[in-house]
Amino acid sequence: MSDDRSFSPLKSTFLLTQDALVELSPDEVSFDNVGQKAFGLSCLPDDWVPPFCVISHDAAKLTLSSSHILELLKSIPWIKNGPLDSLLMVRSSAIHETIGERGQLVSEQTTFRQLQTTLANCLKATESSGQVIHWILQPKIEQKSMGHLSNERRVAKVKRDWLLEFEVTASDAENRSPVPIGIRNWREGDFVGPAVLACGTAIGIDGVLREPAKWATDQKLRIHYEWIWDGSRVWIVQADFCGPVVGIPPESVLPKKIPNIEIAKLKYFRLATGPDFQNYRKLANTQLYSELGYTPPPFYILDDRSVIDSLMAGTPSAAVVNDIETLISQRTLVIRTDGITKQMLPRTDGLSSSEAVLGWFKDELPEKLKTVEGWQGKLVFICHHFLPAVASAWSRAEPDKRVVRVEALWGIPEGMYWYSHDAYEVDTAEVDLGKAIANTDKFKFAERLRYKEWFVAPDDKGVWVNHKASEPYDWKSTITNNEWLSDIAVLTRQIASQLGHSVNVMWFLGVHKDTSQHQILPWFHEKSELNTNTLRVAPRFKDPNSKGIEIHTLSEWTKVIHLPENEKSAIKRISVSPREPNLIRNDGFLKELATFAIKNGAAVELMGGILSHVFYILQREGCIVEIVDPFGTNEESLVFKKLVRDKVPESIEQKGEVVTHLKISGDQLIKALKSKLLEEALEVMDTQSTSDTQEELADVLEVIHAISKHLNISMKSIEETRKQKKLKRGGFDQGIVLVKTSVPPSLSTESFTQEQILSLFTDGVVFEAGSVVLEPDIKLHQDEPESQGIKQRLLEIEFPVSQDMQIKRSTEFKIQARLEKEVVEIPLQGEWVINRKKSDLKVRLLITPAPVQIKLPF
């Protein structure tokens, strides 16, 4: 059970009703009278939240005919004491605007003088929502940065772990990476009380926001904060409480007991035998699994032409209906089509009644066969009962490759496999398959668990529908048994080896004990068409100028299809998370999605795995597909030939990776440590948060300790030297920047005061932080040395090691070229670009011929 607590208001709130302005006590504040958003703000410490009041739904409607009621707001202190032309924000606060609907309603900028007009526009914009919407009025804060801080269940498994994100806007100078914030009371102490979230630097935002994180963690709350930084302090402008996860355990969809079937009663649906496994493609996979030690479940063949014709005509005999009822009596039935060599032949989901089976043969099958040529008189139907299992997986292996990839999720892969999954890699330790099988105890395992909010499983009618996973299953590993992973890896490698090409194998995991003697069972395999060279990882930061959409239902997609062409072309990112059966395994939608994305240059962002059907189809169609989780891609390979901490190789090996390392000493080690010191110092330069800065400073200090140890310099003597230098020359506490120095010119007629002579700055002014831009000085030197009568051009440029990731400088110059007896000068333009990534520098020179004025002979 979850121990989440609910929000409780901490302060009174001004509410404008259609009759009066009232000040609600904390006990009187509720979702109904102020809305979800205002309720959340009222639950936060006063110092963190901009002042606000609430205009009720009825009061806002009353302003359409008269603005007189708004005059009551002028008695509120922060409105009374402020100018009427100061900027305000009007924000929706619907009664049912929970975290799931966050950001879907209205927020408008206004002034008090324009408030009536703004409220009228807001009411018009939200009239179709059908909701009771109150309105928050608060001062407009000019943000220099903004973002989110959350420990929602989807973000963190435990409440003490948070993620800070910086929202990218068109005015942002740089994109800041998300910052994980871990609250540990043993390290930081208990929350002592709220205070103003003062923050004078952008790099300090994460340090300040630790306070709201600590406050919520102490109360065992899950909250999604929205924050704004104005240059001097951070404000919380929204706080959404995250209640307990409401869902079901994946095991709950399994039947408690499965009855046996009386096969002897069947007349037309016969049990599949040896020749059937050789003749029908849909059974060929199963035959291979049998040979490799897996006993398949029973399959039933319907190949009587007259019976098939009667079913499609809707005139089956009583004996045929009796066969269907006998099969259905055990559990949900699945029917697949075979007999001709066509892909994507008709098949069913789970059918749980004889009426559903008969309806499929009579109504759905003939309709689906309209697009299939040459089927008359050739169709065979393979029937089997739905295999109840807790989870499922796809595995991939290549011939003569050690590592097998496994992707697993709760329920069934739902044909398309849209939803989030866990990823595993099994290193079978030997390229030789025989040796690997003989030494399974040497296998190494790596995993990446992900938040799995949704999964697909049959309902009580056999229809594949999406379910929400309850705690702890949303974060629990779908494969907790390494023996299962070993078996999956071995069989997948055996199939790849036998077929001589890469394969994907589908598995059922946690199979019901009444249906199979195996806990895991291979079900299907196909040639892997995965092109690993084209894998793209979804970017952390989205272009603020490009539009992204999320599709949950077929009706949402239909609306997108019917948008005007200019609105379609503006869509650059599409994410799909199905919430209804008609979208879960819809090939038609998938083809439309690919066509739309290609035509409009949009990328499809995929939560599902790279072994999924949807990934394969979209990639095959030429669509841009970006995966959310890059686990196992080349992006995660380690950089070698660098000094690392002593325990790093061991840590990497424990994750299942192979490590090659060596030990150095003496002068070679000192040289490596000095390089490491530069690397770590540059990483301090690149940090964008206080927590990152603390981490990188710790690394710098560790390298300093190592150098002092190997050079026999005590840290005590270093500290004494530091103190002496500070006493003599000062520290770096005051932020003094040396711009330039000047010597009093002896030949100048101008007189200088003693104060100006002693000043470090040209005008004797000490600049405050932020009032001067200190751009790096780039020095360029040119010379014309001569060699064998030909003048050469020497270019020398000095770039400082800068915090900027890229510096550019252009220059014009000429070189001489001898053409027969004539020397010709060629004007050129050079563009120098230096890029720095951590401690690596890359210098690029682009030389372009400059335009030349041709001298005419007359």
Image: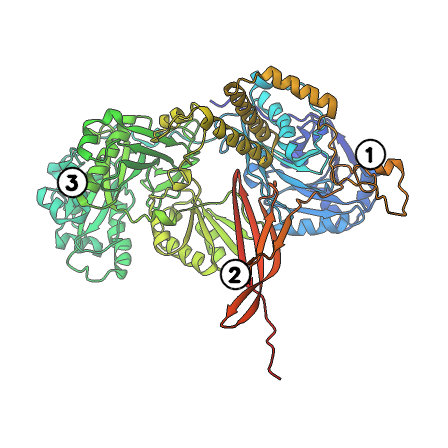
Sequence-first disc among 1 and 2? 1
x, y percent for residue 238? 64, 36
User: What SS does tag 1 mark?
Assistant: helix
x, y percent for residue 370? 27, 61
For this rendering, which residue is in front, 750 or 520?
Answer: 750
Q: Which mark is residue 788?
A: 2
Measured in 3D between alpha carbons, the distance from the residue under mark 1 to the one under mark 3, in whole angstroms, is 80 Å
Q: Amino acid at mark 2?
A: Gln
For this rendering, which residue is in front, 570 or 561?
Answer: 570
View extreme (front): residue: 788
Measured in 3D between alpha carbons, the distance from the residue under mark 1 to the one under mark 2, in whole angstroms, is 85 Å
Residue 567 visible in the shown view: no
Q: Amino acid at mark 3?
A: Leu
Sequence-first disc among 2 and 3? 3
Task: Please count the marks in the image.
Answer: 3
Question: As drawn, is 437 to the left or to the right of 466?
Answer: left
Q: Amino acid at mark 1?
A: Pro
Q: Which residue is mark 1?
A: 77
Q: Which residue is mark 3?
A: 288
Vertical position of residue 538 compared to residue 449: above or below: below
View extreme (bottom): residue: 858
Q: Which mark is residue 272?
A: none
- Mark 1 or 3: in front is 3
x, y percent for residue 335? 23, 46
Crowding near the residue tagged with mark 2, few <14, some 14–19, many ≥20 C-alpha atoms within 10 Å: few
Crowding near the residue tagged with mark 1, few <14, some 14–19, many ≥20 C-alpha atoms within 10 Å: few
Crowding near the residue tagged with mark 3, few <14, some 14–19, many ≥20 C-alpha atoms within 10 Å: some
